[in-house]
Amino acid sequence: MVRLCSASETRAKILKEVGIEFIQCSGDFDEEALLEKYRRPESFVYHATKGKYDNCLQKFGLDLPLIVADTVVSVDGEILRKARNKEEAYRILRRQSGNRVTILTCTMYKSEKKEFVDLSATHYVFDEFEEEDLKEYLESEEWIGKAGACMVEGFCKKYIREVRGYESCARGLTIEKLLPFMDIKK
């Protein structure tokens, strides 16, 4: 059993898919405040994860191993955050349409015996999004709470021209890299 320190339904789903028992909770950390200091996507996602990790370690301790993660989407080095409204989601998605998109996930795992830190990137090249599909996706509100309003397992899937990396990274938890380091029983 582990403590997933994230409110993400997708991260919870990934753990369920691989048969890891967990309890889900989240800490209190304002990652938005980091945007001024860390403008490179790699730096931002690492420091956001580290801030969440430090908060959760202090809040929960290690009665259960901790898993903490954060994900950012970027195009040409620009960080595309979670959209606050439909108009912002549209602008963010138009930025990705027909472009090379990098999705970075930083994962931290800590138990009494082990500590694991990973920063992974998955690179996509998307075809142009069809306007009608984009409008339907925005109306569905599935983009809410998603980094860069992006769902490679959903809306974006049919527009993927090329991919390099793990889909799990793009979904928010690079499980293929994490599993070998976990010292828990399924």
Image (cartoon, rainbow, N blue to C red):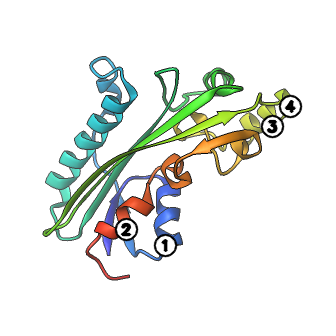
Q: Disc 2 marks which amino acid?
A: Leu
For the residues marked 4 and 3, what is the alpha-carbon distance in whole angstroms? 6 Å
Camera-near label (3 vs 2) is: 2
Q: Does residue 111 sit above or below 90 in this rendering?
A: below
**Callout 4: helix, strand or loop?**
helix
Q: Is residue 83 left or right of residue 77?
A: right
Q: Tell me which amino acid carries mark 1.
A: Val
Q: How would you rate the neighbour count of disc 1 (Cα within 10 Å): few for under 14, some for 14-19, many for 20 or more?
A: few
Q: Position of residue 28 (x, y in %)?
A: 28, 43
SS under mark 2: helix
Give me the C-alpha separation between circle 4 and circle 1.
35 Å
Residues at circles 3 and 2 in contact by the CB criterion of under 8 Å: no
* Among numbered discs 4 and 1, the one appearing first in the sequence: 1
Tag 3: residue type? Glu
Instruction: Give the residue displayed 40% in from the left and 76% down from the top.
Output: 21
**In contact (CB < 8 Å): disc 1 and disc 2:** yes
Residue, disc 2: 179
Q: Which residue is mark 4?
A: 132
- Cα distance between the residues tagged 3 and 1: 31 Å
The residue that label 3 is drawn on is 136
Residues tagged 4 and 3 counted as in contact (Cβ below 8 A): yes
Instruction: Please identify the quadrant where the N terminus is shown.
Output: bottom left
Q: Residue at x 83, y 27 (%)?
A: 131
Residue 26 shown left or right of residue 78 in the figure: left
Front in this rendered view, residue 118 or 173: 118
Contact flag, marks 4 and 1 (Cβ < 8 Å): no
